[in-house]
């Protein structure tokens, strides 16, 4: 989970990833875009992925998770953040 203080178009790349992911782009607690099955790159960083709309929160999940759970642009998101225990 990546949260930003203001909406923007952050770029993500798959450097050192070992598996494919879905990138869920969120703004004001709604999904604004989903990059499905972004391929990992075992050599080098690969292409930079950006949302099509402004986003203030980015969630990475395993590839196929968003589709298998029926997530779509426009869906409301509720984040229950838990502070790590010491």
Image (cartoon, rainbow, N blue to C red):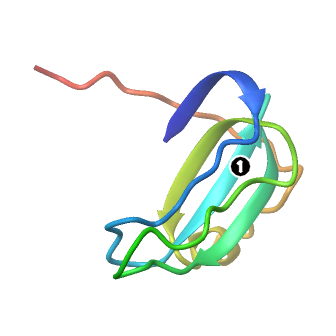
Q: Image quadrant of residue 84?
A: top left
Q: Is residue 19 left or right of residue 63?
A: left
Q: Is residue 54 above or below residue 68?
A: above
Q: Nearer the viewer, residue 50 or 81?
A: 50
Q: Which residue is drawn at the image coordinates 43% and 79% (left, top)?
A: 41
List the single residue furthest toward the left: 86
Left or right of 35 on screen, residue 17? left
Residue 29 image-quadrant placement: top right
Q: Position of residue 67 (x, y in %)?
A: 69, 75
Residue 52 vertical placement versus 40 (above, below): above
**Towards the viewer: 3 or 75:** 3
Identify the element where label 1 is drawn. strand
Tell me which corner region of the image, top left, top right, bottom left or bottom right, holds residue 48: bottom right
Q: Position of residue 36 (x, y in %)?
A: 68, 74
Left or right of residue 12: residue 52: right
Residue 37: give x, y in percent of width and height: 60, 79
> What is the residue that sits farthest to the front in this orientation?
44
Q: Label 1: few (<14), some or many (≥20) within 10 Å?
A: many
Judge by depth and name the residue closer to the eye, 27 or 46: 46
Q: Residue at x 31, y 67 (%)?
A: 16
Side of 29 where 44 appears, left or right: left
Residue 5 % position (x, y) = 64, 17
**Residue picked out by circle 1:** 25
């Amino acid at each position: 989970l990546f949260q930003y203080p203001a909406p923007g178009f952050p770029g993500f790349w798959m450097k050192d990833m070992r598996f494919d992911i879905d990138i869920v782009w969120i703004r004001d607690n709604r999904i604004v875009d989903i990059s499905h099955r972004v391929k990992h790159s075992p050599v080098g960083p690969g292409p930079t992925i950006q949302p099509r709309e402004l986003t203030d929160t980015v969630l990475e999940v395993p590839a196929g998770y968003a589709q298998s759970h029926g997530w779509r642009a426009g869906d409301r998101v509720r984040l229950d953040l838990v502070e790590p225990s010491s």
